[in-house]
Image (cartoon, helix red, strand yellow):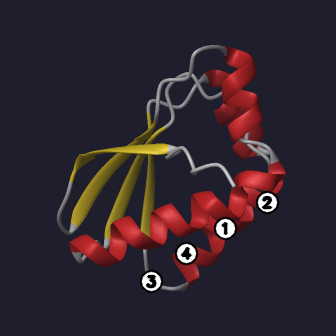
Amino acid sequence: MSEEVPVFVVNETGERSVIAFRDWESARDRLFYLQEAYVAQIRREVEEITAANGCKVLAIDVANVEVVPSSLLAVLVLLTRGGLQIELLHPTKSLLDLLEK
């Protein structure tokens, strides 16, 4: 079994933690890691980061993220229902358009 490659890098920790999607070798790699199969891993990572840092606000840098699977959006909604505030930093126009629909 191969080791999981982290999806996020942690830029700041504390009550307001800042994370970003890690740099991928290519757009193809980015799409691979954002596909539905990795949503459970993404949720685990977010839960671990927030629990370890007493995080109440999670800022996610989404620069260069054009497409987000609906199941990832559902995870973010579930996390907010659990009391976590989510901020999206540097969203692309296409991501903003998607979220406004």
**Mark-to-mark CA distance, 4 and 1:** 6 Å
Residue on which the image places disc 4: 79
Tell me residue 31's x, y (percent): 75, 30
In the rendered structure, the answer to whether residue 2 lies left or right of residue 7 reads right
Residue receiving disc 3: 83
Calculate the distance from the C-alpha at mark 3 to the C-alpha at mark 1. 13 Å
Label 3, label 4: how many angstroms apart (C-alpha)?
7 Å
Residue occupying the far front of the picture: 1
The residue under label 1 is 75
Going from N to C along the chain, the mark reached first, 3 or 1, is 1
Pointer 2 residue: 71
User: Residue 7 vs residue 51: left or right?
Assistant: right
Q: Would you say residue 67 is visible in this rendering?
A: no
Residue 2, placed above or below residue 67: below
Q: Are marks 2 and 1 in contact (CB under 8 Å)?
A: yes
Graded by Cα atoms within 10 Å as few (under 14), some (14 to 19) or many (20 or more), the crowding at tag 1 reads some
- Is mark 3 in CB contact (under 8 Å) with mark 1? no
Question: Which quarter of the figure is the C terminus placed in?
Answer: top right
Give x and y (percent) for residue 87. 43, 53
Do tag 4 and tag 1 residues touch (Cβ < 8 Å)? yes
Q: Secondary structure at mark 4?
A: helix
Q: Is residue 70 above or below residue 34?
A: below
